[in-house]
Image (spheres, coloured by chain):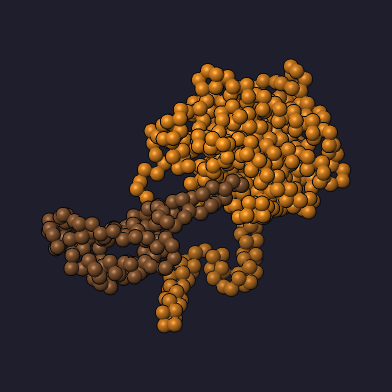
Chain colours: A brown, B orange
């Protein structure tokens, strides 16, 4: 099993979710995060004074998949999240030791 | 289309089988309502006059409701002819008092919106306390200090300490004779309307000192400001003291409420110092944005709404002429304040700033508060326009001077309070009798008195128990540090 952690632009979330559903993956966890890579921050003005905001809002999407589905899952995410402009995000793939479904105590591939 | 016609059919059926029978079951008058509106109106009139005639014949026989009314009139004694207008005016007064109360809701929301969420509980606590202590002290000693009456004893129009309010209905306090046309309300009406004003002065300070003031010190200061300073300074004008003697014009309190609060806030902020992290080591401003613009905006709209009670109620009767004028001038000034502050911030700071536009509304409102009953609609608009410009530069300017005011209270109430007092001279209609020299003297007196009182009290507090939380407490947030609570404990 592998875990995909994807940092994407917030407005892309629905598209990515739909793309994953199309390849048969319907379970995931999302969190609102802030971050930056090479995408620079921007200046804002508040009551007459300028300041820079470095951290930009992003969505972190986490999904654990069977190795067999890893490639199509990644492709789906990347395809849906890409805009071609700076700040599109990144995908990280991590190994997962074990997965357990709480309701039924199933483990391994059945739990994912 | 099918879905729509289905819904139409459903509603028609509901009307036919539920509402019409219900209407049919109600008394005759209700059944008349069923018909098309014009018919209902004409049929209603004869029906109601029929019932009236029926009632009066009943009365003559049974001595009922009309006798009660006659009793009320008799209680008014020689003032009976004014009873209807007296009743209407008193009703307006208590409604206006409730509307001024809403300004506390507005100010709470505005302060919460323009500060960080880690201090929200603290701000709300201070606001809840201020309105409460304001009302209590005003009853215990404030009202009678504010309005010493005909014997303004001791220092001749400067100071007269009052006692707790007693039975304000007694001695004709519930008749037209209490205040006549210039104060068409009962003693209690007078009390409650003014009591709501008292606390607004203190609440101005709470915004300016937010996010770093020590709670206990602030509560002590606020109690003294509202309980002692406010009624004394107020007595100089509305209580018949020195300012009144000079011919000072301050319709609803640009000076004695707003500038008073603004300059008290200035003194406290100078003694307190800016928030940690507001200025970097080179002295540049590092903005600390508020955590909820929606709350801030709602707060301003509530304040604007409450202001109709603040200015409208200050007509002190239901006199239609001044009442309509004051509502109009108040609205136009606020509106122009929004537009002017919003546009100015756009031009000067390259982006239209919502918080500035909101402050602009309040600036316009403070600006019109001194003179709403003696200016024309055009005058009101210009007053609001200028107030909007002033507040933008005042906020930015004070900030650059290292005077950290999270909500802009000093600029909105202090600077624009001065503007309102001067505008009373510049925009007065013929025959208002406002003199520039008097206005200047008066506003200086109020501003200096508020500043001096606050500087002394807050200074003493700083020297004794301290007025500021520690650096760690400020970083952690006052909610955790002072209250052991979180405003948003949920995971949202």
Residue at 59 percent across and 46 percent down: it is: A49
Instruction: Report the number of discs.
Output: 0
Instruction: Choose top left, top right, bottom left or bottom right for residue B57.
Output: bottom right
In this view, B75 is above or below B114: above
Q: Name the residue nearer the viewer: B267 or B328.
A: B267
**B458 lies left or right of A96:** right
Question: Outermost residue toward the bottom?
Answer: B2
Q: Name the residue nearer the viewer: B307 or B239.
A: B307
Q: Name the residue nearer the viewer: B383 or B9.
A: B383
Question: Outermost residue toward the front?
Answer: A38
Residue at 46 percent across and 27 percent down: it is: B470
In this view, B37 is above or below B127: below
Q: Name the residue nearer the viewer: B256 or B62.
A: B256
**B360 lies left or right of B445:** left
Instruction: Choose top left, top right, bottom left or bottom right for residue B168.
Output: top right
Residue at 65 percent across and 24 percent down: it is: B453
Q: Where is residue A57 in the image (x, y as percent from the top left)?
A: 42, 55
């Amino acid at each position: 099993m592998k875990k995909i952690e994807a940092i994407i632009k917030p407005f892309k979330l629905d598209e990515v979710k739909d793309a994953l559903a199309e390849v048969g993956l319907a379970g995931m966890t999302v969190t609102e995060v802030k971050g930056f890579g090479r995408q620079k921050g921007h200046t804002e003005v508040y009551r007459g004074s300028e300041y820079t905001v470095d951290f930009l809002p992003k969505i972190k999407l986490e999904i654990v998949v069977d190795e067999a589905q890893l490639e199509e899952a990644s492709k789906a995410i990347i395809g849906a999240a890409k805009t071609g402009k700076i700040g599109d995000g990144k995908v990280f793939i991590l190994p997962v030791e074990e997965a357990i479904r709480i309701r039924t105590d199933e483990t391994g591939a059945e739990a994912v | 289309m099918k879905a729509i016609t289905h819904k139409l059919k459903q509603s028609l059926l509901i009307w036919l089988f539920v509402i019409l029978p219900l209407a049919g079951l109600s008394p005759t008058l209700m059944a008349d309502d069923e018909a098309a509106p014009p018919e209902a109106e004409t049929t209603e009139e004869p029906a109601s006059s029929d019932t009236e005639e029926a009632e009066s014949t009943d009365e003559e026989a049974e001595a009922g409701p009309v006798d009660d009314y006659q009793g009320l009139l008799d209680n008014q004694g020689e003032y009976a002819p004014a009873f209807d207008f007296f009743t209407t005016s008193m009703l307006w007064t208590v409604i206006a008092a409730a509307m001024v109360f809403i300004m506390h809701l507005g100010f709470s929301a505005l302060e919460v919106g323009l500060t960080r969420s880690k201090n929200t509980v603290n701000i709300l606590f201070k606001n809840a306390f201020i309105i409460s202590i304001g009302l209590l002290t005003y009853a215990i000693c404030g009202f009678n200090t504010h309005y010493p009456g005909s014997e303004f004893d001791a220092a001749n129009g400067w100071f007269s300490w009052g006692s707790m309010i007693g039975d304000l209905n007694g001695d004709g306090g519930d008749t037209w004779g209490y205040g006549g046309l210039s104060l068409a309300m009962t003693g209690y009406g007078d009390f409650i309307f003014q009591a709501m004003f008292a606390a607004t002065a203190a609440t101005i300070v709470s915004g300016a000192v937010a996010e770093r003031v020590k709670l206990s010190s602030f509560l002590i200061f606020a109690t003294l400001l509202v309980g002692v300073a406010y009624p004394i300074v107020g007595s100089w004008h509305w209580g018949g003291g020195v300012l009144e003697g000079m011919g000072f014009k301050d319709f609803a309190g640009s000076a004695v409420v707003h500038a008073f609060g603004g300059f008290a806030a200035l003194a406290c902020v100078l003694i307190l110092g800016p928030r940690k992290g507001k200025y970097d080591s080179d002295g540049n401003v590092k903005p600390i944005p508020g955590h909820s613009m929606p709350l801030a905006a709602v707060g301003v709209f509530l304040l604007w709404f409450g202001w109709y009670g603040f200015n409208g109620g200050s007509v002190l009767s239901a006199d239609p002429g001044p009442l309509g004028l004051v509502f109009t001038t108040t609205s136009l000034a606020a509106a122009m304040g929004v537009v002017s502050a919003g546009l100015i911030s756009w031009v000067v700071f390259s982006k239209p700033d919502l918080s500035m536009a909101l402050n602009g509304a309040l600036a316009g409102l403070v600006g019109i508060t001194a003179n709403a009953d003696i200016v024309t609609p055009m005058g009101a608009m210009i007053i609001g326009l200028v107030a909007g410009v002033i507040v933008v530069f005042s906020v930015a300017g004070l900030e650059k001077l290292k005077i950290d005011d999270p909500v802009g209270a000093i600029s909105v109430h202090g600077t624009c309070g001065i503007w309102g007092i001067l505008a009373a001279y510049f925009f007065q209609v013929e025959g208002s009798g406002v003199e520039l020299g008097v206005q200047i003297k008066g506003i200086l007196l109020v501003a200096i008195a508020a500043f001096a009182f606050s500087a002394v009290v807050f200074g003493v507090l700083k020297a004794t128990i301290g007025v500021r939380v520690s650096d760690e407490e400020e970083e952690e947030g006052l909610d955790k540090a002072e209250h052991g609570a979180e405003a948003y404990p949920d995971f949202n």
